[in-house]
Image (spheres, rainbow, N blue to C red):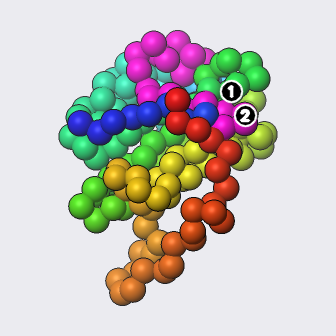
Amino acid sequence: MLDATPLTGTHVRLEPLEHRHHDGLCEAIRDGKLWDLAVTIVPHPGDVRAFINEAHTAQAAGTQLAYATLDLATGKIAGSTRLLAINEPCRRLEIGFTFLGRSWQRTAVNTEAKLPTSTESRTPGNSRSRPPSSRSPGPRAPQASATSQPRPISSS
């Protein structure tokens, strides 16, 4: 099973998605009727328990890590994001399946929501994975050095 670590930034805390996040996640999803959006896949509030169960199953299989996105200013759950398509032997992953309630869209929470997962996955020595640098075959693009990466988060 993959080890999920809480990640904290200036505006956002990403906590491994658990059933205790259910009610707050439902509230965020209702904020803007996110399940009706055509640009992303968001569960209907009635399907959030299954959504969390599926996230736990994917984590146990070693293919995904799901997080609840918390707004540090309010303490409310703003949405969710995931590390997915995790391939540890190749040190690759994708960041996606991200959604935020309407109140958090176009805010600092929205801007920062993917940075903790992106920065954590690029941390030198991280045995979990590294984001793909290119979809095309061939040599990898050079990875930025640790000193050039923004690091406004800390693992807690």
Q: Residue at x 30, y 29 (%)?
A: 56
Q: Are marks 2 and 1 in contact (CB under 8 Å)?
A: yes
Under circle 1, the secondary element is strand
Q: Which residues are magenta?
A: 9-27
Q: Is residue 40 visible?
A: no
Give the residue at mark 2: 11
Give the residue at mark 1: 71
Under circle 2, the secondary element is loop
Residue 126 pos. (x, y %): 40, 52
Dot 2 or dot 1: first in sequence order is 2
Task: State left or right for residue 93 relative to residue 23.
Answer: left
Residue 70 pos. (x, y %): 62, 26
155 or 71, which is in the foreground? 155
Task: State left or right for residue 152 relative to residue 69.
Answer: right
Q: Quadrant of the N terminus?
A: top left
Where is 4 relative to 19, above or below? below
Q: Residue at x 54, y 22 (%)?
A: 25
Task: State left or right for residue 83 relative to residue 10.
Answer: left
Q: Is residue 77 visible?
A: yes
Q: Residue at x 77, y 40 (%)?
A: 108
